[in-house]
């Protein structure tokens, strides 16, 4: 990458900092994006970087940790540590956890819930078929075990932070038990924490956020301020809205995930699985944690079970054409992937989507249906009884996840969402939207919001009693302000975007009242 030069003094106090980063596997895009930011900061501000990563992945980050940084392998989830046999030390650690809970305002139960794919597996046990990880079997056998593991990870995080004394902490998310534990301790010690996230409005851009639930608060505030000040909207924002209306499309990084899974045909899946199993066999002897490794036979049987369920469960899912939808009165609700952080971490009270469907079904006005679109990642992975039970609810229809969502959004009388992108897409299509939680597009100020479940029924009736859009010019202006708000607070997720990333980091660290620092790129 090009060298970065400092045009004036370091007002953010970021020179010579020690950063601690919690990194996913090096082969994942999330890890590469975060490493790119850290390497730029290391080059520009002379940072020392230590990392927590998978034990067998440490060598992949040698360049990043060179110059005094350390590598801390993640602890084995099922390996009981010697200190856990000492009652006094256990009591001391539990006291530390209690102090961190009070300081952060977040109880450990949120850590367990956010980890619904592993130590919190019981929270979505009845909604998704079981993966036979050793860790999952253990936490379902003994419901005290999730908190023992959380205590073990908290102890590890406490030791790492005490050893490194970082000035700043980075991760791609805080929704895993170890990452959440690091966040809690760092929060208690006054160490700033930042998550690097993908944008959900402007493709191929990202942002750094100090927000616990990882929303881009700066974009939301900027969009709202622009809207209230009647600020002009950029041509780029106007084009963004127009292009979506002419050719609606899914958020790019999500679409890439779907395409990747779609390409895994029968033969390709078996080839990939064979490589994975060989690698796991080798890694087992190298000391890799096997707590989240599915036994080979169970992995293969689960695949064939998914193929069968994909065929068998088609009878419970329906599709409608544009003409049918145009004649139907319906409320639309789109499901998340089960155990997705948007539910288990950001909107915990709505984590049980079956309950959300029941709530909405119980509040349908006369003559309306509730169309519930299944998520592609859930299809073939749910117990069949889930569909049977949901379809017994009056006027509930389950939709095929592979049918385009945009035609359902286009004709919906009302779109209800906790915090999903379907709400943003509905606003772009000039539909009524009711939000049950805060979302990344709050700055547009166009959706109706309700936080109290007792008020949802009234909110639904009020939304349906009003036109979808009263003032089209004001509506489009608000959308444009939200697009611009995100554009101005994000950066391209590539080498060229690193100066912007560091500028934004410096601004957030030193506070909004300070003059923004300018980073320029010079040739090496």
Image (tube, rainbow, N blue to C red):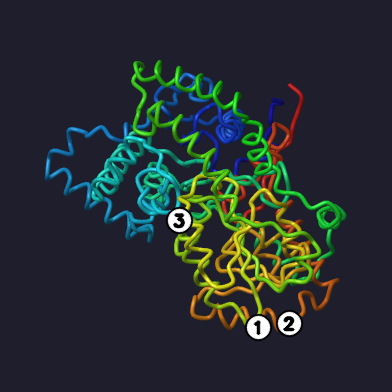
Q: Which mark is residue 361?
A: none
Q: Position of residue 459 (x, y in %)?
A: 60, 80
Labels 1 and 2 touching (C-beta < 8 A)? yes
- Is there any visible trace of residue 490 in the rendered image? yes
Q: Is residue 403 shown above or below 408?
A: above
Name the quarter where the N terminus is drawn: top right
Which element type, helix, strand or loop, lies under badge 1?
Answer: helix
Residue nearer the viewer, 100 or 77: 77
Quarter-of-image position of residue 176? top left
Nearest the viewer among 116 and 59 is 116
Residue at the spot x=51%, y=57% of the render? 387
10 Å crowding of disc 3: few (<14), some (14-19), many (20+)? few
Residue at image coords 60%, 50%: 314
Q: Few, some or many C-alpha atoms within 10 Å of disc 1 (few <14, some 14-19, many ≥20)?
A: few
Tell me if I can see residue 188 in this picture: no
Disc 3 designates what residue? 385
């Amino acid at each position: 990458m090009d060298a970065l030069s400092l045009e004036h003094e370091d007002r953010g106090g970021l020179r010579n900092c020690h950063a601690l980063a919690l990194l996913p596997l090096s082969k994942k895009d999330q890890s590469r994006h975060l490493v790119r930011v850290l390497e730029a900061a290391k080059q520009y501000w002379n940072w020392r970087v230590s990392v927590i990563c998978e034990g067998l992945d440490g060598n992949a980050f040698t360049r990043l940790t060179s110059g005094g940084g350390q590598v801390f392998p993640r602890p084995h989830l099922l390996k009981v540590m010697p200190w856990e046999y000492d009652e006094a030390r256990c009591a001391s650690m539990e006291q530390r956890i209690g102090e961190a809970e009070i300081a952060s305002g977040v109880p450990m139960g949120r850590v367990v819930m956010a980890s619904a794919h592993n130590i919190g597996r019981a929270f979505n046990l009845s909604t998704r078929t079981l993966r036979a990880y050793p860790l999952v079997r253990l936490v379902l056998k003994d419901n005290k075990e999730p908190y023992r593991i959380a205590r073990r990870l908290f102890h590890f995080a406490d030791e790492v932070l005490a050893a490194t004394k970082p000035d700043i902490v980075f991760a791609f998310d805080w929704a895993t038990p170890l990452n959440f534990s690091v966040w809690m301790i760092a929060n208690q010690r006054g160490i700033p924490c930042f998550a690097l996230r993908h944008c959900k409005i402007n493709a191929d851009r990202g942002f750094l956020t100090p927000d616990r639930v990882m929303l881009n608060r700066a974009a939301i505030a900027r969009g709202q301020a622009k809207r209230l000040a009647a600020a002009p909207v950029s041509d780029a924002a106007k084009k963004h809205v127009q292009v979506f209306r002419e050719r609606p499309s899914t958020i790019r990084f999500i679409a890439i995930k779907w395409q990747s899974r779609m390409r895994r045909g029968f033969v390709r899946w078996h080839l990939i699985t064979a490589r994975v199993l060989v690698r796991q066999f080798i890694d087992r002897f190298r000391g890799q944690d096997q707590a989240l490794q599915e036994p080979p036979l169970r992995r293969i049987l689960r695949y064939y079970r998914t193929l069968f369920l994909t065929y068998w469960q088609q009878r419970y899912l329906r599709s409608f054409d544009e003409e049918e939808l145009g004649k139907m009165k319906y409320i639309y609700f789109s499901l998340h992937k089960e155990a997705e952080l948007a539910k288990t971490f950001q909107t915990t009270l709505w984590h049980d989507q079956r309950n959300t469907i029941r709530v909405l079904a119980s509040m349908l006005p006369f003559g309306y249906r509730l169309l519930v679109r299944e998520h592609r990642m859930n299809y073939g992975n749910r117990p069949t009884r889930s569909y049977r039970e949901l379809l017994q609810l009056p006027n509930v229809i389950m939709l095929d996840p592979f049918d385009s969502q945009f035609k359902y959004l286009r004709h919906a009388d009302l779109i209800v969402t906790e915090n999903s992108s379907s709400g943003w897409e509905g606003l772009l299509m000039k539909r009524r939207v009711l939000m049950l939680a805060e979302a990344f597009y709050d700055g547009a100020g166009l959706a109706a919001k309700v936080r109290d479940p007792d008020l949802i029924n009234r909110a639904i009736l009020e939304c349906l009693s009003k036109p979808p859009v009263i003032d089209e010019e004001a509506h489009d202006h608000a959308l444009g302000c939200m697009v611009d708000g995100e554009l101005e607070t994000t950066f391209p997720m590539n080498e060229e975007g690193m100066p912007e990333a560091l500028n934004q980091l410096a601004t957030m660290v030193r506070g909004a009242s300070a003059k923004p620092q300018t980073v320029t790129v010079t040739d090496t």
